[in-house]
Amino acid sequence: MQRDVMEYDVVIVGAGPSGLSTACRIMQLAQEAGQELAVCLVEKGSEIGAHILSGAVIEDRAMNELFPDWKEMGAPLNTAVTGDEVYFLTSDEKSVKTPHWAIPKPMHNDGNYIVSLGNVCRWLGEQAEALGVEIYPGFPAASLIIEDDVVKGVVTGDMGVAEDGSEKDSFMPGMELRAKYTVFAEGCRGHLGKELISRFNLDAGKDPQHYGIGIKELWDIDPSKHQEGLVLHGAGWPLSESNSTGGFFLYHTENNQVVVGLITDLSYSNPHVSPFDEFQRMKHHSCATDTS
Ligand SMILES: Cc1cc2nc3c(=O)[nH]c(=O)nc-3n(C[C@H](O)[C@H](O)[C@H](O)COP(=O)(O)OP(=O)(O)OC[C@H]3O[C@@H](n4cnc5c(N)ncnc54)[C@H](O)[C@@H]3O)c2cc1C
């Protein structure tokens, strides 16, 4: 099949926080060195942020390094964390609050921000474009271009393909995006990443990856219960009933909203465990209802 070919210095796959930060940093370095670089970023979502799970607590360290004046620039880190609470749920009604001194260090969120990660990505996308990155949302990188055992770029997905695989009238073959450097920032379990890991044995001598299923909801709550900046984490019930592990989170973000979720570790041995139903049960616990 004849494909259009476009040549770049750098092609980046995926417009999550990592792909967008990479794009911005490469352009900043090029500008500092007085060099012109052609950088292209493809994202399979219909727009930047479309495939990003919003509602996260993030550190501002990387943002400080990338854009030291991000506050003046209007980055959407609007809700500073004001309090951390960690609970162990002992039953469907009861819980024990962990004293502050006993909370493990990585779970302390002093100085962190509750954000919509989708909005952070949209903002990073604007910065990347202003720095001269060509961004193509709606373009999945479908396959790798590997020649002489060297990654030379990616091929974007064909458009206008019918369900049975035949070409519709609107068929358009994907393009070859060739580059000196290709950066894969597909997130976890990206299909190209899996191919690269297996082909180049990138996991040799490494720990196997661990996975969980995370379900997240955004709630509008009674303003009288809203405590902007409060971060709650917890473990125990309901997963403890099936000897499974994981934990819940509840973040009071701006606009009287809370982000609520449950992560179920994918190491559960009871095949009847249903992460969705466990989340439904967890939402009725007083830890969730009293604080939201
Ligand atoms: C339920 C849940 C809660 C979380 N909460 C937090 C939190 O509170 N704080 C925190 O710091 N982290 C949190 N995380 C982790 C955080 O979301 C990830 O660490 C972060 O999103 C990883 O960024 P990334 O850019 O590597 O990948 P991703 O954010 O996964 O972005 C990858 C992007 O690449 C695109 N893409 C993938 N494949 C292709 C392809 N072939 N072609 C084109 N585009 C492609 C995707 O559409 C996506 O936009 C949470 C994760 C989950 C699942």
Image (cartoon, rainbow, N blue to C red):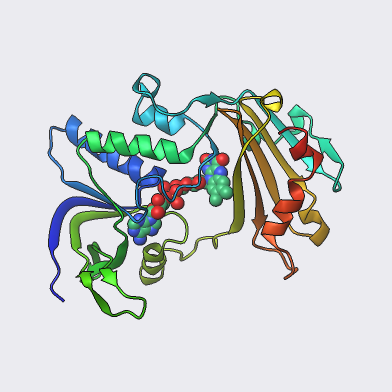
Q: Nearer the viewer, residue 218 or 33?
A: 218
Looking at the image, residue 252 lies above or below residue 14: above
For the N terminus, give its image quadrant. bottom left
Q: Would residue 28 be found to the left or right of residue 258 on screen?
A: left
Q: Nearer the viewer, residue 219 or 31?
A: 219
Question: In the rendering, at what x and y percent does residue 3 appear?
Answer: 15, 69
Residue at 61 percent across and 57 percent down: it is 212
Question: In the rendering, at what x and y percent does residue 19 appear?
Answer: 35, 46
Q: Nearer the viewer, residue 211 or 168?
A: 168
Q: Quadrant of residue 231?
A: top right
Q: Quadrant of residue 270?
A: bottom right
Residue at 72 percent across and 58 percent down: it is 277
Residue at 39 percent across and 62 percent down: it is 193
Question: In the rendering, at what x and y percent does residue 158 appear?
Answer: 26, 68
Let me know if residue 143 appears in the view: yes
Q: Give the farthest residue toward the top.
A: 72
Question: In the rendering, at what x and y percent does residue 73 appear?
Answer: 34, 23
For the C terminus, give its image quadrant. top right
Q: Nearer the viewer, residue 183 or 217?
A: 217
**Count of labels in the image:** 0
Looking at the image, residue 11 lies above or below residue 221: below
Q: Give the farthest residue toward the front.
A: 169
Q: Would residue 18 be found to the left or right of residue 139 on screen?
A: right
Q: Would residue 133 be found to the left or right of residue 86 on screen?
A: left
Let me know if residue 245 appears in the view: no
